[in-house]
């Protein structure tokens, strides 16, 4: 039986699954959210003064842990703490833009409890950089089925109660330049006003990847701008209408020009 949210946090009942498959089943059966670090979830519930009647704890699921380097990609468990990733010297050396993005998430105390899977599930600060890194996901459905797919596709149609189990990040090639810029206020716990990430490879301009996110802005790839950025096109005067098409929420806001300036600066840096 599914119960409505409660205004008394003491009534929240924590469910403890024995496996990832069990967790997905419990979440669907009780219409319950997943809990890992719960840094974003707690903030949202506190703001609304509403807490779920049930929540599925993932803490004991070792199968969602780990961070391993394979010949072609990094395989990171959904429960990997952000601080664990920033403390991995090989990961930070090979993916410095990801390290920069990780260090920009909250304060050190938040990064110590927040997880990579949770940041994705709550459309957090890391999505733009993960999108341009072409991150791939593994997840479980409530019937136990295991699915795989691109993060881009997941964001277009997140499966209800789908449990992310692993994030796979392909290794950039030597000619790839990956960058991230974050525009944020100094107030604690405020989401960034704008996140702009890019991946450039001028020997293969068709592989240019651009992404954005921010407060009130669902993270996404900038497909129109990606098509425009090539060695023989993409001038400043043509970028704004393309960016307005990719980010219609910002079409009449000063942030659109800021986004354009950041992209042009990253493009210039990517040519060096």
Image (spheres, grey):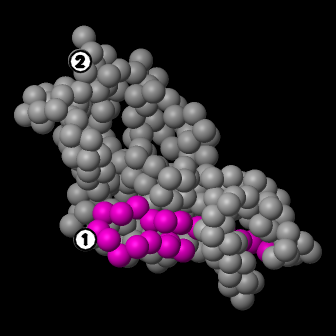
Please, is residue 169 above or below residue 187 in the view? above
Pick out the residue farthest to the bottom: 272
Measured as percent of width and height from the top left, residue 60 is found at 19, 40
Callout 1 crowding tier (Cα within 10 Å): few <14, some 14–19, many ≥20: few
Residue 31 vertical position relative to residue 212 in the rendered view, above or below = above
Q: Quadrant of residue 83?
A: bottom left
Looking at the image, tell me whether mark 2 or mark 1 is earlier in sequence order. 2
Find disc 2 in the rendering and name its residue. Answer: 3
Q: Say what secondary structure mark 2 lies in.
A: loop
Image quarter hosting the C terminus: bottom right
| Segment colored magenta | 181-202
What kind of element bears circle 1?
helix
* Comparing labels 2 and 1, the label whose residue is closer to the camera: 2
Distance from the alpha carbon under mark 2 to that under mark 1: 35 Å
Place of residue 42 in the rendered image (x, y in percent of width and height, measured from the top left): 23, 47
User: What crowding class fits label 2: few (fewer than 14 Cα within 10 Å), some (14-19), or many (20 or more)?
Assistant: few
Q: Provide the residue designation for mark 1.
A: 108
User: In the displayed structure, would residue 60 be above or below residue 239?
Assistant: above
Identify the image quadrant of the N terminus. Answer: top left
């Amino acid at each position: 039986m599914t119960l409505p949210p409660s205004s008394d946090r003491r009534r929240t009942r924590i469910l403890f699954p024995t496996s990832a498959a069990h967790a997905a089943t419990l979440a669907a059966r009780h219409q319950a959210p997943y809990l890992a670090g719960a840094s974003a979830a707690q903030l949202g519930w506190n703001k609304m003064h509403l807490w779920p009647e049930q929540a599925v704890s993932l803490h004991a699921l070792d199968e969602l842990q780990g961070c391993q380097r394979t010949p072609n990609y990094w395989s990171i468990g959904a429960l990997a703490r952000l601080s664990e990733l920033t403390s991995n010297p090989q990961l930070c050396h090979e993916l410095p833009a990801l390290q920069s993005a990780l260090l920009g998430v909250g304060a050190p105390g938040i990064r110590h409890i927040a997880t990579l899977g949770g940041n994705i599930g709550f459309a957090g600060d890391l999505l733009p950089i993960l999108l341009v890194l072409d991150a791939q996901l593994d997840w479980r459905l409530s019937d136990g089925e295991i699915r795989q797919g691109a993060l881009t596709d997941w964001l277009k149609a997140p499966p209800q109660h789908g449990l992310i189990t692993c994030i796979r990040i392909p290794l950039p090639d030597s000619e790839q330049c990956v960058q991230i810029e974050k525009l944020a206020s100094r107030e604690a716990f405020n989401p960034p006003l704008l996140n702009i990430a890019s991946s450039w490879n001028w020997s293969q301009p068709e592989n240019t990847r651009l992404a954005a996110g921010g407060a009130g802005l669902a993270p996404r790839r900038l497909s129109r701008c990606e098509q425009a950025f090539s060695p023989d096109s993409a001038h400043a005067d043509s970028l704004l209408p393309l960016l307005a098409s990719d980010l219609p929420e910002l079409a009449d806001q000063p942030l659109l020009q800021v986004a354009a300036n950041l992209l042009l600066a990253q493009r210039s840096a990517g040519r060096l």
